[in-house]
Image (cartoon, grey):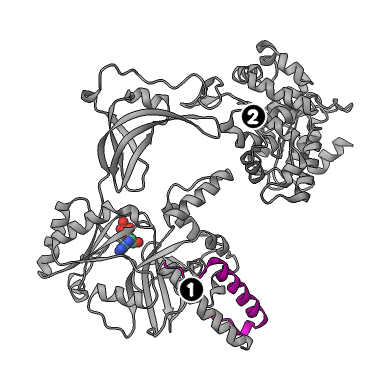
Amino acid sequence: MDEFAEIEALCRELIQAGYEYYVLDKPTMSDYEYDHKLRRLEDLEAAHPEAVTPDSPTQRIGGQALESFTQVTHQVPLESLQDVFDFQELEAFDQRVKGAVPNAEYVVEPKVDGLSVALEYLDGIFVRGATRGDGRVGEDVTENLRTVRSIPLKIPDAPSRLIVRGEVYMPKKVFHTLNEERERRGEALFANPRNAAAGSLRQLDPKVAAARKLDIAVFNIQWTEGSDFSTHVETLKYLRDKGFKVIPHNSCSQISEVTEGIQEIGEHRERFPFDIDGAVIKVNDLSQRTTLGSTAKFPRWAAAYKYPPEVKPSQVVDIVIQVGRTGVLTPKAVLSPVRLAGTTVTNATLHNQDFITEKDIRIGDTVLVRKAGEIIPEVLSVVMDKRPEGTQPYFLPQTCPVCGAPVEREEDGAHTRCTGAECPAQLLRNLAHFASRDAMDIDGLGIAVVENLVKAGLVKTPGDLYFLNEDDVAQLERMGKKSAQNLMTALEKSKEQDLSRLIFAFGIRQVGQKAGKILAARFHTLDALQNASLEELTAVDDIGEITAQSILDWMSSPQSRHLIDRLREAGVNMAAAEQGSDQRFAGMTFVLTGALEKFTRDEAGEMIESRGGKSSGSVSKKTTYVVAGEAAGSKLRKAQELGIPVLSEDEFLELLK
Ligand code: AMP
C-alpha cells in the first residue's frame, strides 16, 4: 500500500474506532492499538502534509494557543427555557400548550447541566463551534470543541449547511479524577462538573481543553438546508445516524407519561454520565412548535422541570472523625442508608464542633437529611421527638484519632487541628512542605516522589528522609538509578541549610518564612529555641503571643522532639549562619516596590537581611528607604507623602558597594 492509501485507511479505521468508543460507548479497539496507529498516522502526515484531511483524528489533538476568543453572532438564537417547579405548574404548562394545539405530544429529556454550544457544518465539515453567550452572541471555541472526541469532524451525506445544538459536559468520572489530581498537586478544586466544563471550554490553549476530556449530548437542529423533518424525534434519529451523540429521550402521548418520565429521570439520575439540573419537556411536532412560537425569552413549546431537593429522615448511627492533610479534624455522621436524589446516602459531614453544638446532633438521633442532585448531602436538623433516652451531647475528641497527639481549637476559626508533627494523616503535606523551595529546598522531592516514598513505607516522618537508602529509592515507580542518586545528593546538600529554613520547614502553626528568619537570628541554635520561655519568645520583635504559644506547644510535644532527634542524628544543621561582619543596614527598614529589573525581590531581600536590615511590605514613618522600580504605584506615593527617601535600583546597588 502506498503511503497516501495508508493515510486514508488509517484515518477511516481510527475515525470508526473513535466513534465506537466515544459515541456508542462500545470500544472495539484497544487503547494500545489506537495510540500506536495514531502515532503512525502522525508520522505519515508529517511526511505528507498535503494529505492531511480536516477530519483526520490528528486534527483533534489541540493546535496553537489563542490570544483571545472572537465573537460569533448566532444565526438562530440559543434560547433559554421556562422553569416549572412542580407537577401543578407542569399541568398549567400543558394546559397552555393544549389551548393552542389540543393534540400536542411531548418528548422528555434529561436537562444536562453543562454548557450550550452551537456546532456548524459546511458541506459536512465541522467549521465552527460557539458558546451560547447571551443567546445571541457567543464566543468562537472551535479549537476546543475539535478536541471533544464525540463531536464528528465530518458527517456523511450532509446538507450544504447544518447547525446543531448540544450541551457540552465534563463526565462525572473525569471530574472526580481531575479533582483528585488537583488536590494532590495542591491546586484549587472545581466546585462541580459544570464549572470544570466551563473552565475547560474557555481555555485559550486547546491542549489544556483536550486533556479535560469533555463530552457532548446533542439535542437540537438549529438550522438546516434541504432536509424536511416533521418531528423532534425524527431530527434526533437523523442526528444519531450522522454520527452525533444524541440526548437520551422518551416520547409521551399523555401528560401522565410525561410525569412518569420526569420521575424516572430523577430517580435514575446517577446512571447518566453527566449531572442533570432538571428534565426538559418539549412538544414533538415541529409545525405545532411554529404555531406556539416564542416569547422574548423562551419557546412556548418547551419547559424545564426543576427537581425539588429531597429531604428524608435518617438515623445517626455513629460520628466518626477524619483527619485531613492539613491536620483538621472533620466529624462525619454515619447515617442509616437513605435514598435521596438518585443516590444512596450513608454519611454526611458535620463540619466542626460549632455545627454540631448549634444543632445539638447526638449519636442515636434521627436527623433530616437533604440532597439536591449532585450536591453533597447535608444534615438540616434533629427530629427532637425521636431522640432516644440517654443520649449525650457530642464533643470532638481531645486527641487526634490517627496519632494520639493533643488537638487544638483554632483561635480565629471553627477548626480543630491535630498538633502532631509526625501525624501520618498529615505526612504527605508535611513532607512536601519540608522539601519545598523556601524550606529545605530538596531538589527532586516533589509531591509524586513523596507519595511514592510514603506508599512504599520508606518514610514515616520527615526525619526518615535522611535515612533513605539509595537502592530502595531507585526501586520506586518512575525513579531509576540516576534520579535516586540525584535525590540522595539533594538530601545531603539540604542538611547544610540555614536554621531559619529548618524552623520554617517544621510547619509550626503561625511560623512562616519570615518568623523562621527572625527566630534564627535571635536564638542562633535550635537548642536555644527549644529552651526559650514564653517571655523570651514574646520579647522578640514581630513575635506575638499566639505565635509564641504555638512555638512553645510544638517544641514541647513528644513527636516534635522525636523529629528533632532524628534530624540531629542525621547531621542536619541546627545553627544559624554566622552573622556577616557587614552589618551596614542594621536598624534600617527597606520597602521594595514596582517592577525590579536588576534583581528579584527575593534577592534584594537577601542582600538587605544579610547586612542586618529588614525588608517590609508597607511604607510607614519607620521606613528608611523605598527602592522603586518601573511603574511603582501607591507605595511610592506614600513614601513621597511621608518624605521617605526613594532609591532607584542603581542607587540601591551603590549603597551595597
Ligand atoms: P436555562 O439556562 O436554565 O434557561 O435552561 C436552558 C438551558 O438548558 C439551555 O441553554 C441548554 O443549554 C440546557 N439544556 C440541557 N439539556 C437540554 C435539553 N435536553 N434540551 C434543551 N436544553 C437543554
Q: Is residue 556 left or right of residue 206?
A: right
Which quadrant of the figure contains the N terminus? bottom right
Q: Are marks 1 and 2 in contact (CB under 8 Å)?
A: no
Residue 526 on image: x %, y %: 75, 21
Name the quadrant where ligand 1 sits. bottom left
- Please give the label number shown on residue 507: 2
Residue 161 on image: x %, y %: 39, 82
Q: Is residue 294 left or right of residue 461?
A: left
User: Residue flagged by tag 1: what amino acid is it?
Assistant: Ala
- Please give the label number shown on residue 279: none
Q: In this picture, is 451 found above or below 624? A: below
Tell me, yes or no, whether the highlighted magenta stretch contains residue 32: yes
Which quadrant of the figure contains the C terminus? top right
Q: Tell me which numbered mark, 1 or 2, is placed earlier along the sequence.
A: 1
Secondary structure beneath dot 2 equals loop
User: Residue flagged by tag 2: what amino acid is it?
Assistant: Gly
Q: Which residues are magenta?
A: 26-54
Q: Which residue is mark 1?
A: 17
Residue 355 on image: x %, y %: 38, 27
